[in-house]
Image (tube, rainbow, N blue to C red):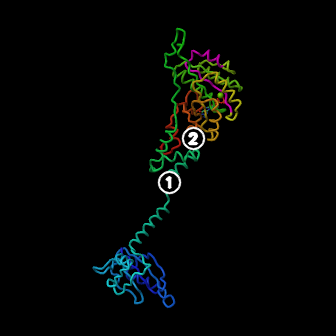
């Protein structure tokens, strides 16, 4: 790299010098107008700083007009003489070295930069920084957060989850976010019954120590409680060959008991109904030989406090070991969160997601599962009884909102 500074009476003259000495490829680094030393008598001059990658072959060495001045830096250093920076620093220290200058090389003016090479390096750094700033930046966490919002996660939780993609390459980002989601979901596994044999057949039925496992399903209207209950009854009564009883606390709605009666008949399991705490306690006594009692409840709106409180009293009489809050996956996120709040008075112990087959995006259920802090029990995904129910899996839910994880 050869850098030179030219001074002349006019810009055209200065540029002619640049072209004559450095060739047509010379790059103009800076131009400025110099004030005359004697303001009233002198004339303004112009200065051009230019650079060329290397000495252009055949470029005239001294194509300088009489009216112009030139100062060559670095490359035209006289043999054994100081470099431009040496000269500049000497002059800056007040040690002018006139003997070292070529006849047409003027002294560096006070406003000249001490080292143009350093200045050029600084310009290059600045340009590189500018280019980096102007280039479109790949903000991986922002992209992840945008996708999570798109599938139904709230912006606040999306930002929290997307933090897992911070400092991770784009290829690993979704795997990191999926791991973060899995880490925040809890899963219970299927309903665990007493080991087979705890309820000894014959000789008076169940051993005194064995008590039926009582599992209730609660939730908003139409969430899929009764259908899911029938699926569970089918699994435990038919597939697992355990003694199951059905208890309906839904005597409120016309046709609700009839729905359960049909399931009970088809599955060949006993069914009892209770419309008050005393009746619920009696039903429990009558089911003392059962290994699993599945309790169906009436659906209410999450904001219907009085009815939910009444149901809570009835349910308490059934003394459930587990209360699964059934939420339909296609429900909008804020309604899901409202349901969790509203049903707190029923003290749910698990979250059961239904209608997963109907859900377009699962960000809302991921959010509600994280925020409710309850373990997920089952995924119910279809109208058919007894199929289409599986134990909940955090991996599946995380993969459903992390596209590349699912690929
Ligand atoms: N696609 C789909 N439909 C379902 C699923 N579960 C239940 N349903 C349907 O949803 C509707 C309501 O189901 P129910 O089981 O009666 O709901 P519920 O929560 O008991 O309703 P209420 O007792 O009225 O509060 C029925 O048409 C079911 O067939 C599911 O996982 N997928
Ligand atoms: Mg029902």
Q: Is residue 124 above or below residue 204?
A: below
Estimate the x, y position of residue 340 in percent, counting from the top left: 62, 35
Estimate the x, y position of residue 343 in percent, counting from the top left: 64, 32
Q: Is residue 260 visible?
A: yes
* Label 2: element kind: helix
Around disc 1, counting alpha carbons within 10 Å, would you say few (fewer than 14), some (14 to 19), or many (20 or more)? Answer: few
Whole-angstrom CA distance, mark 2 to mark 1, is 23 Å
Residue in front for this viewpoint, 23 or 275: 275
Residue 15 falls in image quadrant: bottom left
Pick whichever of labels 2 and 1 is earlier in the sequence: 1
Residue in front for this viewpoint, 227 or 385: 227
Q: Is residue 340 above or below residue 120?
A: above
Q: Is residue 405 above or below residue 259?
A: below
Residue located beneath label 1 in the image: 139
Q: Is residue 406 visible?
A: no
Residue located beneath label 2 in the image: 367
Residue in front for this viewpoint, 333 or 9: 9
- Residue at the far left: name it: 80
- Residue at the far top: name it: 203
- Residue labelled 1 has its Cβ within 8 Å of some atom of ligand 1: no
Residue range in magenta is: 280-300
Q: Quadrant of ligand 1?
A: top right
282 falls in the magenta region: yes
Q: Residue at x 30, y 81 (%)?
A: 78
């Amino acid at each position: 790299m050869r850098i030179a500074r030219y001074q002349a009476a006019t810009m055209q003259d200065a540029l002619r010098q640049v072209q004559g000495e450095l060739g047509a490829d010379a790059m103009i680094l800076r131009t400025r107008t110099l004030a005359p030393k004697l303001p009233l008598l002198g004339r303004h001059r112009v200065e051009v700083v230019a650079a060329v990658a290397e000495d252009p072959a055949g470029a005239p060495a001294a194509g300088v007009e009489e009216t112009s001045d030139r100062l060559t830096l670095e490359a035209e250093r006289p043999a054994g003489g100081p470099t431009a920076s040496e000269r500049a620093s000497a002059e800056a220290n007040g040690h002018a070295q006139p003997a070292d200058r070529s006849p047409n090389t003027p002294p560096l003016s006070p406003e000249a930069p001490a080292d143009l090479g350093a200045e050029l390096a600084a310009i290059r750094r600045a340009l590189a920084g500018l280019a980096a700033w102007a280039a479109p930046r790949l903000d991986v966490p922002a992209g992840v957060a945008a996708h999570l919002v798109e599938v139904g996660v709230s912006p606040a939780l999306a930002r929290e989850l997307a933090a897992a993609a911070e400092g991770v390459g784009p290829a690993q980002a979704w795997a990191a976010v999926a791991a973060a989601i899995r880490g925040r979901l809890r899963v219970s596994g299927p309903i665990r019954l007493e080991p087979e044999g705890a309820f000894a057949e014959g000789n008076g039925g169940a051993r005194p120590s064995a008590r039926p496992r009582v599992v209730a399903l609660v939730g908003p209207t139409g969430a899929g409680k009764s259908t899911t209950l029938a699926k569970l009854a089918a699994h435990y009564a038919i597939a697992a060959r355990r003694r199951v009883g059905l208890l309906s606390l839904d005597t409120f709605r016309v046709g609700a008991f009839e729905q359960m009666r049909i399931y009970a008949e088809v599955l060949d399991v006993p069914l009892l109904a209770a419309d008050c705490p005393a009746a619920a306690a009696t039903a429990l006594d009558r089911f003392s030989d059962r290994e699993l009692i599945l309790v169906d409840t009436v659906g209410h709106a999450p904001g219907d406090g009085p009815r939910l409180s009444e149901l809570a009293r009835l349910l308490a009489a059934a003394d459930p070991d587990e209360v699964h809050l059934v939420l339909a996956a296609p429900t909008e996120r804020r309604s899901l969160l409202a349901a969790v709040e509203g049903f707190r008075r029923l003290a749910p112990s698990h979250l059961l997601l239904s209608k997963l087959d109907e859900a377009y995006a699962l960000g809302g259920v991921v959010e509600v599962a994280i925020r409710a802090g309850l373990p997920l029990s089952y995924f119910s995904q279809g109208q058919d009884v007894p199929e289409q129910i599986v134990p909940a899996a955090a991996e599946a839910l995380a993969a459903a909102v992390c596209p590349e994880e699912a690929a």
